[in-house]
Amino acid sequence: MSSGSLEDTLETVQEELESLGVEDALAREVVSYRLLVERLGEERNNEWWESLVFTETGRDRLEEVTPKTAVKARIDLAQRIGRKVEQDRLSDNTVSLFYLGPTAESQIDAELENIEKEDVPFETLESLSITFDEAGWADDLVDDTEPAIDTTDTVMPIGEITDESDLKSRRTLREVARQCTVAYGQSTHNDLRVPYYNIDR
């Protein structure tokens, strides 16, 4: 599969999030990056985590357990899986794709509260089947983004945020999410690399 297909998938996910009632453009962008990376890391793809959230099986199970809120539950579960994996590898004074700090996370959660049930969203994600044998698969996924990263370790510092108040800036949050998404592209099958920013306290 080409990066063009990943770009198309990302665009489709953003459109689906909008149709579900996620009105804020930044929240849609961040959540779409998270859902794409989560799907790429699932067991039947690159095996970065034990998850089947964006498979037909995962969808069916959530619809059985939470029929009225299955779509929101699916998004929440996907984000929690990514956040847990990142938190297990990173120190507390960091932000990453699945955790952009308490203010941003509460704003994203508030946006996701507006989700309205749609018949079967995320079919494009479900059908995404790809294994990465080489790093760099996300290089062209986000426009004009080239993080400076050290790829010699399983965690990859991208940069430093010197003022925590910067995490209230939409521009900073968008840049962190974009840089982390592209840096996830250093991960390959069975070899997860977790990108992050240090927060200077």
Image: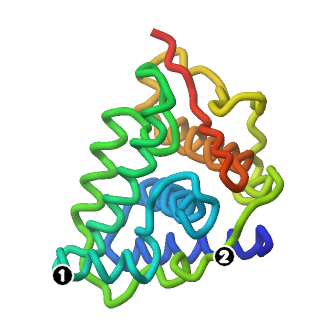
Q: Mark 1 — residue?
A: 67
Question: What's under tag 2, amino acid-wise?
Answer: Asp
Identify the residue at horizontal 36%, vertical 40% (top origin): 104
Q: Residue furthest top?
A: 201
Q: Disc 1 vs disc 2: which is toward the camera? A: 1
Q: Position of residue 62 (x, y in %)?
A: 27, 75
Dividing the picture into quadrants, the one containing residue 151 is: top right
Identify the residue at horizontal 69%, vertical 43% (top origin): 183
Identify the residue at horizontal 33%, vertical 59% (top origin): 77
In the displayed structure, does residue 32 sit left or right of residue 154? left
In the displayed structure, does residue 168 sit left or right of residue 90? left
Q: Mark 2 — residue?
A: 8
Q: Earlier in the sequence, mark 1 or mark 2?
A: 2
Dividing the picture into quadrants, the one containing residue 115 is: bottom left
Q: CA distance from mark 1 to mark 2?
A: 28 Å
Identify the residue at horizontal 27%, vertical 43% (top origin): 106
Question: What's under tag 1, amino acid-wise?
Answer: Pro
Image marks 1 and 2: residues in contact by CB distance under 8 Å: no
In this orientation, which residue lies closer to the viewer: 172 or 76?
A: 76
In the displayed structure, does residue 75 sit left or right of residue 3? left
Q: Tag 1, which secondary structure?
A: loop
Q: Position of residue 109 (x, y in %)?
A: 28, 52
Where, quadrant-wise, is the N terminus in this rendering?
bottom right
Q: Position of residue 152 (x, y in %)?
A: 77, 29
Q: Tag 2, which secondary structure?
A: helix
- How many residues crowd mark 2 within 10 Å: few (<14), some (14–19), many (20+)? few
Where, quadrant-wise, is the C terminus in this rendering?
top left
